[in-house]
Image (tube, rainbow, N blue to C red):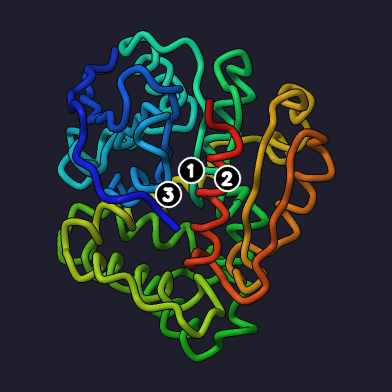
Amino acid sequence: MTFPPIDPLATGRLRTRDGQEIHWETSGNPRGKPALYLHGGPGSGILTGHRRRFDPERWLVVALEQRGCGRSTPRVTDALDTLATNTTDALIADIEALREHLGIDAWLVHGVSWGTTLGLAYAQAHPERVTELVLICVVSTSAAEVTWITEDLRRVFPREWERFEAASKRRPGQRVIDAYHERITSPDPIERDEAARAWCAWEDTHVSLDPRYRPQPLFDDPVFRGTFATLTIHYWKHAGFLDDGALLSRMDRIAHIPGAMIHGRLDISSPLEWPWQLQRAWPKSTLTIIDDEGHGGETMIAEVVSAIARFAP
């Protein structure tokens, strides 16, 4: 289903105008068709699996660790004040700066989970720089989606949600997401870690109804856990820093760009309704629904590999 593991061709650090340093890597064929990988989270960073989705003879694959996470510095948990400049617009600017730094004219964009929101926002801001979009586990990061995940899913997971809600220590009438934002940005590192643990436990609960889903082992790492929770809560509190309905209302900007979306029917945290709406507004896109998988799975990855292959040179 995927290609053999490969090492990066090159790695580097790109300094932004506001003093951050973004870690990036390239892999595959330096003369191949360019592609950009956008990781999820927010805050997950890049691992290695994305490289295996591209034929290394045909593609030049670029990946970056979004500001504040992974090997990009400063890490958000070491510099909470940098949250003020960690926004979707800032990430889009980072992507454009990297494209220019690498001398790439345009590229296929492959996003996963939060990376699909970022990928769509980037494509709508710079449609002339995107040749195709391949999106898996498609999310909107809208205020409604945040409310669904943090409040409404108590109807599906009442026992686990009660623990999640209690750990937020919210005040009467306060949103769960706002309470977690207060805790995860506290000056007390113990309080931040308690919030991160509770947040990631809920993440492992709601992310999928697929019985084959396994808890994320990286959540056992306190550094990863803190980074992931801090950035996810930050972006969710602000609904992805996007106006309500903005992504859907701007689909005319990318209507000409071919796209493929892959989504699992059992993905309860990111219901199928959103990619379904997108596909109806995006005539050059396809939507592949995997009936027996949720927020990721082997069949979904196989469909991603197949979609990328259709756009190969």
> Which mark, by number, is residue 232?
none
Q: Amino acid at mark 3?
A: Gly
Q: Residue furthest bottom?
A: 159
Q: Examine the rendered structure and indicate whether residue 268 appears above or below residue 135.
A: below
Q: Is residue 215 left or right of residue 138?
A: left
Where residue 58 sits, quadrant-wise, is top left
Picture residue at 34% right of the left edge, 43% below the top: 51
Q: Nearer the viewer, residue 163 or 107?
A: 107
Q: Quadrant of the N terminus?
A: bottom left
Q: Which residue in the protein does label 2 denote?
A: 135
Q: Position of residue 245 (x, y in %)?
A: 73, 40
Q: Amino acid at mark 1?
A: Gly
Earlier-in-chain disc, 2 versus 3: 3
Query: How many C-alpha atoms fall within 10 Å of the one at disc 1: few (<14), some, or many (≥20)?
Result: many
Where residue 169 sits, quadrant-wise, is bottom left
Q: Which residue in the protein does label 3 denote?
A: 40
* SS type, badge 2: strand
Where residue 137 sits, quadrant-wise, is bottom right
Earlier-in-chain disc, 2 versus 1: 1
Q: CA distance from mark 3 to mark 1?
A: 5 Å
Q: Examine the rendered structure and indicate whether residue 155 appears above or below residue 183.
A: below
Q: Nearer the viewer, residue 203 or 146?
A: 203
Q: Position of residue 37 (x, y in %)?
A: 42, 37
* SS type, badge 3: loop
Q: CA distance from mark 2 to mark 1?
A: 8 Å
Mark 3 in CB contact with mark 1 (< 8 angstroms)? yes
Q: Amino acid at mark 2?
A: Leu
Q: Which residue in the protein does label 1 denote?
A: 115
Q: CA distance from mark 2 to mark 3?
A: 11 Å
Mark 2 in CB contact with mark 3 (< 8 angstroms)? no
